[in-house]
Amino acid sequence: MSLSAEQSRHVSEITDAIRNTNAEHTPPVPYGRRELRFERPLVMGILNVTPDSFSDGGECLTKEAAVRKFQEMVSEGADIIDIGAESTRPGAVPISEDEELSRLLPVLREVVSSKVPVSVDTRHASVAEEAVRAGASIVNDISGLRDPEMTEVVARSGCPVVAMHMRGDPQNMQSLTVYEDLLGDIHTELARILQRAEAGGIQREKVILDPGIGFAKTTEQNLEIIRRLGELRSLGRPLLIGASRKRFIGEISGGGPKERLAGSIAAAVMAVTNGANIVRVHDVAPTVQALKVAHAVISPTARPY
Ligand code: HH2
């Protein structure tokens, strides 16, 4: 049976769409002499060395507590550990870069020789620079390379960068939630970030993109991003989703941040099903287990991990 030209076009559109949503075919991201590979979804464990993070603030204020938490997440199967020293929850008060560094560096120096790569969650170029000098492998910038100095630091370092979509800053972002077409606007803005990164000397293959769950987004918008995540695959870059314990989960299901584990896992599984390559989570062990099962369902021929 031969297909008409129109039928052939449909088939090729569908094939492209399947290829684009298939996160397993995302090329690896090199860091140092190693690489992040995406044959399966990766889990980024969160280590907040802050007094005021929305769900775990104050839990890792001493170096000992932070290192213990780091090692626990490694033994639970984290693929990357993201250390943040400034809370960016809605309404958070910014801190000085010196304060951020004084929280971050002592912990970072203790853990950088781990087999698991460390990313540093900062929007400040000077903090990223010091962290990379101390051995961090990845920069996670929630402000999406807004600061040209950050682009310079990342380009010079040769590190991969997670560039996240947000509008405004943590103090005013929740008043900036009007979009013409949510996924279209985020796609356009992430494409611009990618262009800016390349123009500033960051290799395209080093950029991981994140639509920024909860950053200038309402509950409905967070859900729509997860539902339509596949539309961002055409950006051609690995996608990271950070939904863990966030407010929208509480708004849907009730409960404070510590009571959002099942909801967080549901969000992680849906994100991976729809094309996420990395999920950023507080609860590593249960997420790893859930994703092993989700991955086995999505990719029956893949090797178990
Ligand atoms: N979310 C938070 C912080 N950093 N980075 C990326 N790439 N994506 C995210 O969604 C993201 C992020 C907020 O979560 P958390 O670190 O737990 O809270 P706080 O900012 O209060 O420390």
Image (tube, grey):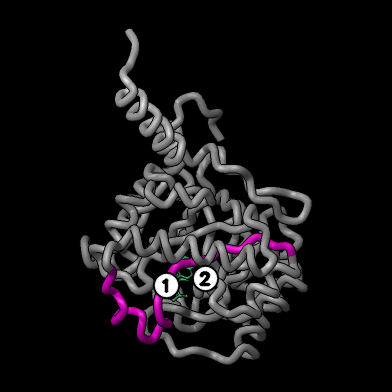
Place of residue 274 in the rendered image (x, y in percent of width and height, measured from the top left)? 37, 45
Residue 95: where, in percent of width, then height? 53, 90
Question: In the image, what residue occupies the spot 60% across and 56% down?
Answer: 80
Q: Quadrant of residue 124?
A: bottom right
Magenta-highlighted residues: 158-179
* Distance from Cα at disc 2 to Cα at disc 1: 7 Å
Task: Read off the residue under disc 2.
Answer: 144
Q: Residue at x 35, y 69 (%)?
A: 214
Q: Amino acid at mark 1?
A: Met
In the image shown, does 169 or 3 lie closer to the viewer? 3
| 299 on left or right of 67 | left
Is 236 left or right of 29, judged from the image as shown?
A: left
- Residue at image position (57%, 76%) is 122
Q: Secondary structure at mark 2?
A: loop
Judge whether residue 172 is colored magenta.
yes
Classify residue 260 as left or right of residue 59: left
| CA neighbours of label 2 inside 10 A, class few (<14), some (14 to 19), many (20+) | many
Picture mark count: 2
- Which quadrant is home to the N terminus? top left
- Mark 1 crowd level (few <14, some 14–19, many ≥20, 10 Å Cα): many
Q: Main secondary structure of the magenta part?
A: loop
Q: Position of residue 263 (x, y in %)?
A: 30, 56
Q: Quadrant of the C terminus?
A: top right
Instruction: Report the residue marked by disc 1.
Output: 166
Find numbered disc 1 in the image and state the secondary structure of the residue it sits on. Answer: loop
For this view, does 12 lie left or right of residue 106?
Answer: left
Q: Are marks 2 and 1 in contact (CB under 8 Å)?
A: yes
Amino acid at circle 2: Gly
Instruction: Please indicate, yes or no, whether residue 272 appears anywhere in the rendered image.
Output: yes
Residue 116 in the magenta stretch? The answer is no
